[in-house]
Image (cartoon, coloured by chain):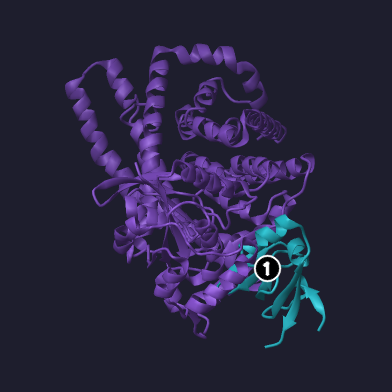
Chain colours: A cyan, B purple
């Protein structure tokens, strides 16, 4: 199964976080919002023109910029 | 004195618990980052008086964000002083993420007690947590609470003395695995269907439905603000003031102090309360009849949107536009707060990460639109000349605000950071909390602004009646008036504007300016200087040097746009 980044995940699809491409700071900030390697996330939607992407992790929703989403690599989970 | 630090992730209800414990009113909303400054209050625990501190929210203790560092510094200081307890507020609907901070707190040398808040909401969405077990694992008391209704608060207060240092042993590097184990042991999640609020939540952020709904929501909000504000003025406060208060107070002054100078000072020289400046007429008419109704309706609408949880969603929708100004979408929250008053708006820029962002955001906040008292005053005195003048004033300011931020973004080195925010679930606003918040915001206007307005009007009255205005105007006014094309009397208005900007606009009324001068004067008065309180907060947030630079930019833009308008009007022979 191929790995894709978050921007390529479709609305409503879920993925398992495989990798976060960035330094300690980024890992840390994402982690504190619940986004970390091994975590299941669901894409809620994305805004037009490379706008931010909204995710669901457990019971919370997080919005993150397009550039950040590009750096989060996931594996699609078939439901 | 013993001390309790309220700590927890953003938007878990710390401030609501704080209000419950201390009775002190603080602003609470449904989005992360409402509390940027700590608030102190006091409560009784047994017979002892205890200090309670509402600490700004933080996701983690090893934070890199400036807004969160405040929390960490306060904790470290409390650990040193050895007289504090941490009341860790945990969102029961997001146990895993919240336990991250909890485990970090348990490693510290300080007693901890946990309030498992939003307990009802967790139940609604099918989450059940074994409190006993969680308590046993963590080794500190865990009390389920519903802060908004007060459920569990009594038990929480009774359990405070039982707070103790954590004895839960774990390797910091394996924190997430530990958390995973705990959650698995204590939490049971039932499968469930999407709630109605969640569906609305999704619809309002999907671009296809979100953008139209944003337009509708903002338009309806605007209409409601106008409807309530205008209604209160025209059908209630204005008649009350003119038909009863004015008659009574005029009789009273005539009876008690029939001296002409005093009479003019207290009641002005015209029948219209805005036609001249009496302390008891204009001094009360401006704040209580013109400004207060709009402030009330604005804060009612804003507080509703805040508590509902709409603002962060709007931030997501606006992210793209704000990126062009060098900001991310979350800056829309300070900008919206700034439509009410610039002071809380500037304080809330602390949620922004870099100094660069803050400078751009502050410029945008100060230029894009006036604060509500000024807006109310402009609407009140310009409306008789036609709505087009209002559109011209607010349209130009809006355009200028956007242009200034756009240019600052090009001029300042660096780029816009990426958006990264938590979107809270929609919640039904609680009327009692909503009205308390509105009242809190209004009372700070009444207590801090009204005395300044009355004082300003007293000063102006004395200077006007003694003839000093004319001398000052002649000395200082010439160049300014040449550029802006305003009559000499307006100089004094400009000078007093620094004190209270709504008063300065009210002062234009008795001058009976032609509409074009009124437009120029309004725009210039909105821009040229921030009011004293705004400047004070600005220099604290940005430093004196940056603030002075920004003020210079404001002043020059005010002159430029006023001067250009003056020229355009002249060329068009308007």
Quadrant of image for the N terminus of chain B: top left
Residue in front for this viewpoint, B397 or B2? B2
Residue bearing the label numbered 1: A36
Q: How many discs mark residues in the rendered view?
A: 1
Instruction: Tell me if residue B362 comes above or below residue A63 in the rendering.
Output: above
> Where A31 falls versus B510 (above or below)?
below
Q: Tell me the quarter of the image containing the C terminus of chain B.
A: top right
Q: Is residue B204 visible?
A: no
Vertical placement of residue B64 versus B317, above or below: above
Picture residue at 75% right of the left edge, 44% below the top: B409
Residue count near mark 1 (Cα–Cα under 10 Å), binned few <14, some 14–19, many ≥20: many
Residue B164 picture quarter: bottom left
Place of residue B283 in the rendered image (x, y in percent of width and height, measured from the top left)? 36, 31
Q: Position of residue B214 (x, y in %)?
A: 59, 64
Residue sitting at x 44%, y 65%: B139
Q: Residue furthest right?
A: A2
Q: Position of residue B519 (x, y in %)?
A: 58, 36
Residue, far bottom: A79
Quarter occupied by residue A46:
bottom right
Element on which disc 1 rests: loop
B303 horizontally vs B338: left or right? left
Residue B406 appears at what percent x and percent y?
Answer: 74, 45
Residue A68 in view, yes or no? yes
Chain letter belonging to callout 1 = A
């Amino acid at each position: 199964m191929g790995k894709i980044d978050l921007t390529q995940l479709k609305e409503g699809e879920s993925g398992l976080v495989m990798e976060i491409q960035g330094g300690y700071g980024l890992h840390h900030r994402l982690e504190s919002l619940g986004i970390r390697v091994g975590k299941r996330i669901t894409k809620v939607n994305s805004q037009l023109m490379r706008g931010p992407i909204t995710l669901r992790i457990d019971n919370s929703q997080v919005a993150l910029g397009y550039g950040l989403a590009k750096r989060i690599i996931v594996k699609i989970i078939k439901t | 004195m013993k001390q309790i630090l309220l700590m927890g992730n953003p938007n878990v209800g710390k401030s609501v618990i704080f209000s419950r414990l201390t009775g002190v009113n603080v602003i609470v909303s449904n989005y992360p980052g409402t509390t940027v400054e700590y608030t102190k209050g006091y409560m009784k625990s047994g017979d002892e008086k205890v200090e309670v501190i509402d600490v700004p929210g933080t996701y983690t203790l090893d934070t890199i964000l400036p807004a969160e560092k405040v929390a960490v510094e306060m904790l470290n200081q409390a650990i040193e002083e050895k007289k504090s307890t941490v009341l860790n507020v945990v969102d029961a609907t997001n146990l895993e993420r919240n336990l991250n901070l909890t485990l970090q707190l348990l490693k510290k040398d300080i007693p901890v007690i946990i309030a498992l808040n939003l307990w009802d909401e967790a139940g609604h969405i099918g989450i059940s947590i074994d409190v006993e077990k969680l308590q046993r694992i963590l080794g500190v008391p865990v009390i389920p609470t519903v802060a908004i209704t007060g459920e569990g608060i009594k038990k929480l207060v009774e359990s405070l003395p039982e707070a103790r240092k954590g004895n839960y042993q774990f390797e910091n590097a394996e924190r997430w695995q530990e958390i995973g184990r705990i959650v698995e042991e204590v939490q049971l999640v039932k499968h469930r269907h999407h709630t109605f609020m969640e569906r609305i939540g999704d619809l309002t952020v999907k671009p296809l439905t979100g953008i139209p709904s944003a337009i509708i929501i903002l338009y309806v909000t605007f209409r409601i603000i106008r409807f309530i504000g205008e209604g209160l003025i025209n059908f209630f406060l204005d008649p009350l003031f003119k038909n009863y208060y004015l008659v009574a107070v005029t009789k009273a002054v005539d009876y008690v102090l029939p001296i002409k100078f005093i009479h003019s000072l207290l009641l002005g020289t015209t029948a219209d309360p805005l036609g001249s400046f009496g302390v008891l007429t204009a001094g009360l008419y401006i704040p209580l009849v013109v400004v207060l109704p709009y402030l009330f309706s604005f804060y009612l609408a804003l507080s509703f949107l805040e508590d509902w949880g709409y603002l962060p969603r709007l931030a997501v929708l606006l992210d793209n536009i704000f990126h062009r100004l060098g900001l991310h979408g979350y800056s829309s929250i300070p900008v919206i707060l700034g439509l009410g008053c610039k002071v809380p708006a500037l304080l809330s820029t602390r949620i922004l990460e870099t100094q660069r962002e803050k400078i751009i955001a502050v410029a945008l906040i100060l230029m894009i639109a006036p604060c509500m008292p000024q807006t109310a005053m402009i609407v009140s005195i310009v409306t008789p000349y036609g709505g087009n003048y209002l559109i011209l004033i607010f349209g130009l300011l809006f355009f200028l605000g956007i242009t200034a931020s756009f240019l600052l973004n090009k001029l300042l080195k660096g780029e816009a950071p990426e958006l990264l925010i938590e979107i809270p679930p929609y919640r039904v606003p609680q009327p009692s909390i909503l009205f308390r918040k509105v009242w809190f915001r209004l009372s700070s206007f009444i207590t801090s602004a009204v005395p300044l307005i009355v004082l300003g009007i007293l000063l102006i009255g004395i200077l006007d009646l003694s003839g000093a205005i004319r001398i000052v105007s002649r000395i200082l006014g010439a160049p300014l008036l040449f550029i802006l094309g305003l009559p000499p009397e307006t100089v004094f208005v400009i000078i007093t504007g620094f004190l209270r900007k709504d008063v300065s606009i009210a002062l234009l009324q008795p001058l009976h300016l032609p509409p074009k001068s009124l437009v120029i004067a309004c725009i210039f008065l909105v821009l040229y200087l921030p009011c004293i309180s705004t400047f004070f907060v600005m220099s604290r947030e940005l430093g004196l040097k940056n603030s002075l630079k920004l003020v210079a930019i404001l002043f020059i833009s005010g002159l430029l746009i006023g001067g250009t308008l003056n020229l355009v009007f002249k060329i068009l022979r308007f």
